[in-house]
Each structure stands twice: as structure tokens, then as C-alpha cells.
Amino acid sequence: MEATIARDAKKIVIKIGSSTLTSPDGSIDKGFLDSFASQVKELMDQGRKVILVSSGAGAAGANTIGKWSRKGDLHYKQALCAIGQVELMDSYRRTFDQYGIHIAQILLTKEDFDSSQRTMNIRNTLFTLMDEGVIPIVNENDTVSTDEIKIGDNDILAANTAVVWGADLLVLLSRIEGIYDSNPSTHGDAHIIPMIEDIDSLEEKLSLADPESTKAGGIKTKLKAAKLANKYGIPMIVVNGKIENVIKRIAEGDIEGTLFAPHSK
């Protein structure tokens, strides 16, 4: 079942976390990006369609303007993201251009998903880009986002994007291997759960056994994203983004990590 879900997916949303996209020094990992673009090209050649949700603007901005990186002021953080978006998109553009693929940037806030008119506009833009073979790269508009209007996490943004587009599969490329049955940093016998169908039960079990389990590695937001995606019948996979040929392997049904599978109707 798990392998079939990935092999049959034609519309795939892939979220790339900052730890996957960047090198230890904070710069864009060009080796990863080139390999990733090559794998996406293979998916497109198979007739599949892909939307990216990319983190990394803040890290790219801090790497470019190092003297601001330690400033905690909101305006500096937003300014770093503005600088980083240019660096990030230029890296994507240069890399995907080598494979004959055009990209487009879409910056969103929570308000865009709260408005039915804006949501429809997002949907129409995504479909138009996809029809023309252009890959949309979605990110939160950090340069204008405040606590009142920000989505807050790209896992949630990716889930919202998958729902609006009607994706067949949502993939979260992360620094973690998958969802563990307990916190691996405090439990040496922790194991990855290959498939999860009842998120509420798992969340309750983890919280009762170890309150920190749902906080480690951004697990809390991943569970929230999975709930949203699964509610609309969209499977979600959490996997370590640094695994070699990770997208190709998932598309072939060679699933690593954890699959959140919607309940069968």
C-alpha cells in the first residue's frame, strides 16, 4: 500500500527544510540542489507535476549579510529574508535552468488562505504555471509577516498548498529520519514508525509518555501538517532530505521515513 501511494502520485508538493537546503556554513548546498533538480526533471519527464515549498531565505540572507545575522530585531530579520529571497531564487533559477525548467516565486501569508477569493487566485495561478511547465516555488512572505498574519512554519504552508492544489502526495524533506515512537535524543531504543493512520492517538501517546517528544525536530508542526493533509485525503511523507536520490526513491515506491496515510473510506 505504502509503495503504491507514492508510485501513483501525479501531483506532488515537496517541502524543503533549511537544514536540507543549506550547508553547515549556511550557504546554499549546490550539490544537493543540482541533484534535486535532476530528480524533479525525471518526475516531470514521467508526466508528474511538482510544486516546491522552500525554506532557506533567512539562512541565505544571514550568509550574505553576516554582520546582521545576530541581530534579533524583527526588522533586521525581515530584511535578511528579503535579501535571502533573492539569493535563494537565483540559486533555484540557475540550477533548474540547466535542465530547461522555468521557475516562479509565490510569496504568501496566512491571510491569503483565510480569504476565499485569495485562495482561488492562488489556485488559479498554480494551475496556470503547472499547465505551462513552470515549477512554482512557494514560501511565506517573511518580509511583511508579523505574529498576526504569519503562517509560522513551512510544514503548515506546504500542507495548505497541497490542499489548495489538490495534490496526490505531500513530501516533507527534513533533518529527521521520520517520526519516532519516542524522543530519540532521550530514548536510545526509539524507532521510526513506518506508517501512521491515527495521528490523534499517536500524539496523545507521545505526549503522555514524553511531553518533549512532539517538540523535538519540529514534530508538532509535522503532525499538524499531516492532520490537515490527511483530512483532505492527501498522504504525507516525512523523510531525511539528505538521503541520496531521496525524491527518485520515493517516486519509485522505495519509501524511507514515515508515511501518514489517510483513513480508508
Image (tube, rainbow, N blue to C red):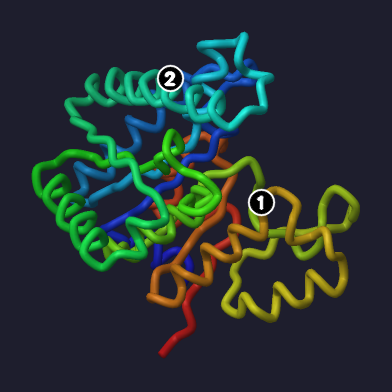
Residue closer to the observer: 231 or 265? 231
Q: Which amino acid, by three-letter code, is at mark 1?
A: Gly
Which residue appears farthest toward the bottom when viewing the image? Answer: 265
Q: Residue at x 40, y 32 (%)?
A: 36
Which residue corresponds to mark 1?
Answer: 218
Secondary structure type for disc 1? helix
Camera-side residue of 138 and 109 = 109
- In the image, residue 226 lies at what x, y percent? 52, 66
Q: Is residue 171 left or right of residue 52?
A: right
Near mark 2 (Cα within 10 A), the count class, few <14, some 14-19 or many ≥20, is: many
Q: Label 2 belongs to which residue?
A: 83
The amino acid beneath tag 2 is Ile
- How far from the left and from the top, in percent, is residue 179? 67, 59
Q: Nearer the viewer, mark 1 or mark 2?
A: 2
Residue 23 percent location from the top left of the image? 58, 21
| Crowd around label 1: few <14 · some 14–19 · many ≥20 (10 Å) | some
Asked whether 74 or 175 is in front, the reply is: 74
Q: In the image, what residue occupies the spot 28% across and 36% down?
A: 105
Residue 67: assigned label = none
Above or below for 191 versus 99: below
Q: Quadrant of residue 206?
A: bottom right
